[in-house]
């Protein structure tokens, strides 16, 4: 789980003040405190969960069309001021305002799930005869806890919030400390659209209270996106409760450029997949394997492209790559680069003048890398990519699978049949061909190995947020 808490004095008290915990969002732009909010005490969190549980039956009893309409209205409300969204995201986590926030993807995912809701949740009728009615219905879990990350704070949250509400669940949202304002904006928008406060609540929680809500069975389903350690904490909290825990824990996603690839397209898209959002993407490209006949040209074109990036203040519309969200993440990226260079790798991008040794970090391309180096094994989560030459498909498949993560992979080829053939041998959640770093809401967002196990978006996303209930009704005739 990501976040930071400290002890502070509650405003309005004199000597003998009650000490309260607060959570702070430190802006990567200048290190200032952008937001600070009090952490909800356990008793208050339990009460909020109890109100959500009490409200759930009435919410689920509403016609599905009404729930869908309210979710659509909430989405539209979020989109009323995308300029504000972009600026607030720049202050909170450093993404340049030139990219316009996240509303396009946010809306696409939510509205797609609204469009398919009836199909996804329609009962499966096995028999409807004069003698029997036999069918399987989908029933909401009850109270869904969404623990959302900071790196794509609107889009990752809506993946679960929209289908959970449409399916008849109530939702408690615990957003990351780095993006506190996003949770507040989502709550404001959905309440303004008419969704009751007890049906959708934004809570500011610390780790201990979050885990206590799960362990105490105050919620019925958990969706967590974040680190491996955070996912393990969620599963430990749920141990013995039988509460489903859906996890998406990041990756070390590879790209493979075959000899028949469109080289220019591969360079452009794979470098964007590695560097966009300062590399802070769970499905970002962190390893690239290039068939040896294209290797030199691929590297040369990639270096030229990345050298043209403009690092700087994300509020400047000319900035193409902003700061890392926190110094902790920048330090990990720098450590991975330094470790690789110490073991013989070559760093091909000279330090940018704007690199301050802190959160403003030069994007980096490494060659002469091996899988003995951290940068090719552990999640860097920064604008750093290692590139290796490979002889053939067999070597590429072996190296792509040589990872403890399994979220996505990107294959670059003109041969779709070969891409399918290779894809079946890859240990991953999604196989892309000639693209990367995109969530198609019609497909299941899932992973394997240390990426965790979940099923977001698509029809399967609705199935994850509901449970099957069978009816075997014998009619008396």
Image: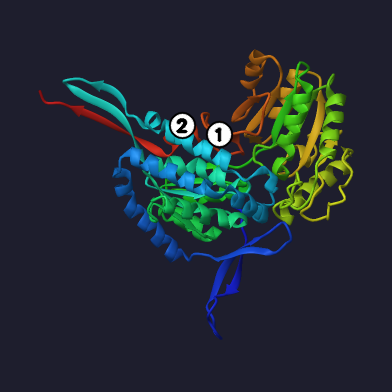
**Local secondary structure at mark 1:** loop
Query: Residue 394: percent from the left, percent from the top?
Result: 74, 19
Question: Circle 1 sits on which residue?
Answer: 446
Q: Earlier in the sequence, mark 1 or mark 2?
A: 1
Picture quadrant of residue 28: bottom right
**Local secondary structure at mark 2:** helix
Question: Are the residues tagged 1 and 2 within 8 Å (C-beta)?
Answer: yes
Residue 175 seen: no
Q: Is 129 above or below relative to 100?
A: above
Q: Which residue shows up at 81% across the image and 32% down it? A: 387
Query: Dot 1 surroundings within 10 Å: few (below 14), some, or many (20 or more)?
Result: many
- The one nearer the camera, 98 or 37, is 98
Query: Residue 36: percent from the left, percent from the top?
Result: 59, 65
| The residue positioned farthest toward the bottom in the image shown | 15
Residue 410 seen: yes
Q: Which residue shows up at 80% across the image and 41% down it? A: 309
Query: Residue 342: percent from the left, percent from the top?
Result: 88, 44
Per the rendering, the mark at residue 460 is 2
- The quadrant of the rendering that contains the C terminus is top left
Q: Which residue shows up at 71% across the image and 35% down it? A: 273
Picture quadrant of residue 27: bottom right
How far apart are the two marked residues, 1 and 2, measured between alpha carbons? Answer: 10 Å
Query: Residue 96: percent from the left, percent from the top?
Result: 70, 48
Q: Is residue 236 left or right of residue 199?
A: right
């Amino acid at each position: 789980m990501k976040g930071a808490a400290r002890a502070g004095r509650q405003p309005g008290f004199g000597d003998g003040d009650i000490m309260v915990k607060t959570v702070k969002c430190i802006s990567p732009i200048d290190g200032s405190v952008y937001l600070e909010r009090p952490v909800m005490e356990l008793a208050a969190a339990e009460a909020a969960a109890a109100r959500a549980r009490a409200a759930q039956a009435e919410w689920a009893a509403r016609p599905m069309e009404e729930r869908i309409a309210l979710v659509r209205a909430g989405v539209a409300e979020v989109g009323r001021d995308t300029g504000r969204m972009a600026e607030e995201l720049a202050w909170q986590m450093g993404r340049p305002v030139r990219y316009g926030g996240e509303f396009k993807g946010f809306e696409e995912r939510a509205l797609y799930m609204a469009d398919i809701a009836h199909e996804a949740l329609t009962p499966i009728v096995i028999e409807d005869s004069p003698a029997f009615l036999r069918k399987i219905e989908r029933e909401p879990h009850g109270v869904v806890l969404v623990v959302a990350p900071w790196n794509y704070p609107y889009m990752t949250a809506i993946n679960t919030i929209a289908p959970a509400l449409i399916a008849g669940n109530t939702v408690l949202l615990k957003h990351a400390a780095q993006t506190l304002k996003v949770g507040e904006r989502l709550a404001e928008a959905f309440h303004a659209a008419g969704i009751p406060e007890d049906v959708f609540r934004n809570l500011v929680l610390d780790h201990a209270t979050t885990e206590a809500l799960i362990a105490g069975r105050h919620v019925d389903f958990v969706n967590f996106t974040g680190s491996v350690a955070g996912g393990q904490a969620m599963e430990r909290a749920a141990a013995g409760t039988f509460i489903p825990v859906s996890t998406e824990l990041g990756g070390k996603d590879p790209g493979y450029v075959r000899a028949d690839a469109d080289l220019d397209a591969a360079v452009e898209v794979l470098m964007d997949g590695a560097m966009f959002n300062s590399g802070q993407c769970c499905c970002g490209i962190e390893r690239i394997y290039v068939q040896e006949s294209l290797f030199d040209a691929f590297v040369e074109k990639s270096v030229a492209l990345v050298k043209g990036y403009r690092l700087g203040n994300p509020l400047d519309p000319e900035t193409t790559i902003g700061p890392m969200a926190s110094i902790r993440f920048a330090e990990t990226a720098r450590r991975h680069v330094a470790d690789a260079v110490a073991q013989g790798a070559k760093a091909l991008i000279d330090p940018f003048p704007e690199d301050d040794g802190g959160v403003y970090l030069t994007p980096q391309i490494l060659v002469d890398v091996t899988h003995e180096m951290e940068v090719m094994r552990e999640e860097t989560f920064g604008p750093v990519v290692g590139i290796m030459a490979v002889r053939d498909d067999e070597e590429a498949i072996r190296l792509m699978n040589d990872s403890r993560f399994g979220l996505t992979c990107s294959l670059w080829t003109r041969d779709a049949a070969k891409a399918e053939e290779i894809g079946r041998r890859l240990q991953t959640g999604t196989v892309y061909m000639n693209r990367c770093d995109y969530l198609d809401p019609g497909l299941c967002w899932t992973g394997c190995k240390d990426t965790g196990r979940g099923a977001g978006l698509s029809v399967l996303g609705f199935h994850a947020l509901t449970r099957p209930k069978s009816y075997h009704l014998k009619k008396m005739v």
